[in-house]
Image: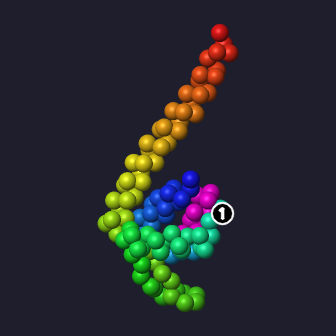
Amino acid sequence: MLKGIIDGCLLAIIQKGEVYGYELAEKLEDFGFDSFSEGTIYPLLLRMQKEELVTSTLKKSTAGPKRKYYTLTPKGEIELGNFHNRWNILQVNVNNVLYSITDTEGEGKNE
């Protein structure tokens, strides 16, 4: 279930400014996604690059080898907008189910 959600979250983080893989893992962890390592993120970034959602540029690092920084492409911006729309619909539908079930169960007890 998280697959598409993580993709959308990565696109949203990258939209805020170019970022490298390890930094993405740190940012996801800051947002509560603590089970995603660089090893999980890099295959997703590679796929997104093949799908032309992101581009990458090698840049000097202050410590160690060059880092690959990712930025959104126009196609990535569109996909992020589509993700927002799908997320909003999913959130509304899940909330409708959850609260409908809760409300229905609670109604019969008070009569």
Is 9 rendered above or below residue 66? above
Quarter of the image for residue 110 reads top right
Q: Is residue 54 visible?
A: no
Is 78 rendered above or below residue 101? below
Helix, strand or loop at label 1? It is: loop
Q: Which residue is mark 1?
A: 35
In the image, what residue type sits under mark 1? Answer: Ser
Q: How many marks?
A: 1
Residue 56 lies in magenta, yes or no?
no
Residue 29 lies in magenta, yes or no?
yes
Please name whichever residue, 88 or 18, is drawn nearer the observer in this view of the structure.
88
Seen at 36% across and 71% down, the residue is 52
- Residue 18, position as x, y percentages in the image: 44, 72
Please name whichever residue, 46 or 38, is drawn nearer the observer in this view of the structure.
46
- Residue 102, position as x, y percentages in the image: 61, 27
- Residue 106, position as x, y percentages in the image: 64, 21
Q: Tell me which secondary structure the magenta stretch mostly adopts.
A: helix
Q: Residue furthest top?
A: 111
